[in-house]
Amino acid sequence: MTEDLWHRLAGDVERVDSVAGRALHAVVRDRAAPLRIQVAGRVGTGFRSVRDAVRASAGADGTVEVESVAVDVPDTADPVFDGDVVVYAVPVRLDPASVHPADRSALSHIDARRVVVVVVGGTVEHVDPVAATLGLGAFAVGDPALTDAIAARLAAASRLRDEHLVRMVAGIAALIASMRHATSPDGHVNTTACT
């Protein structure tokens, strides 16, 4: 269905049930919004260069918004990772298997299905120890597979939006059907059908 048809359906639902209609309008609006990629990392670790690379590849066509999220900033609240995809920059340390506690903490608050870890300041051989330490897949800056990983996460996020919309519509249809079933032919509510 096109966005116009979804909005028309939401309007029809709103005429029957204003709360359900407004909820459906919100889901349709969210589904149509550009996907969001948050590029996160600690200040001074090179995460802004990762953001620029992500913006150049994924955000070039305007269908994806790319924003920066600084982690472990003194006197600042912890960031909220609410993007559809989070690209998290982890710098290489003297011990390649070592990951800064602030990075570990931040990554523990992100659904692994939405995160792509990028190892900054090293080469491909630095990626595997970091990936093993975090228990997440990781990529080096400039790795062609990085673009593919981000694209796969974006596609999954788009499918999740579609699934959320379909669940919402199915739930509304089920509610309307149960309301029809609960009403007797003479217009009275059948309370036994509502339980």
Image: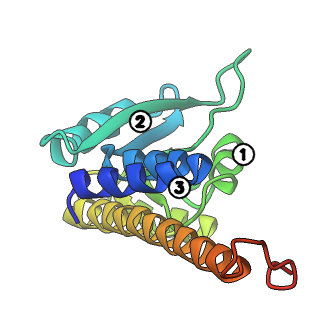
Which quadrant of the figure contains the C terminus? bottom right
* SS assignment at label 3: helix
Return the residue at label 3.
16
Viewer-nearest residue: 131 or 122: 131
Q: Mark 1 or mark 3, which is nearer the start of the sequence?
A: 3
Name the amino acid type tagged 3: Val
Direction from residue 57 to residue 40 in the image, left or right? right
Viewer-nearest residue: 174 or 128: 174
Residue in view at x 71 percent, y 81 percent? 184
Name the amino acid type tagged 1: Pro
When the figure is inspected, residue 148 is found, relative to residue 174, above or below; the finding is above
Q: Mark 3–mark 2 contact, CB under 8 Å?
A: no
Direction from residue 104 to residue 160 in the image, left or right? left
The local crowd at label 1, few if under 14, some if 14 to 19, many if 20 or more residues have their Cα within 10 Å, is: few
Residue at the far top in the pictured view: 75
Return the residue at label 2.
47
Q: Mark 1 or mark 2, which is nearer the start of the sequence?
A: 2
Q: Mark 2 or mark 3, which is nearer the start of the sequence?
A: 3
Evaluate whether residue 54 shows in this view. Answer: yes
* SS assignment at label 2: helix
Direction from residue 195 to residue 89 in the image, left or right? left
Residue 150 appears at what percent x and percent y? 32, 59
Name the amino acid type tagged 2: Phe
Label at residue 25: none
The local crowd at label 2, few if under 14, some if 14 to 19, many if 20 or more residues have their Cα within 10 Å, is: many
Residue 98 appears at what percent x and percent y? 63, 55
Direction from residue 41 to residue 145 in the image, left or right? left
Residue 17 appears at what percent x and percent y? 58, 53
Residue 84 appears at what percent x and percent y? 44, 52
When the figure is inspected, residue 20 is found, relative to residue 137, above or below; the finding is above
Q: Mark 2–mark 1 contact, CB under 8 Å?
A: no
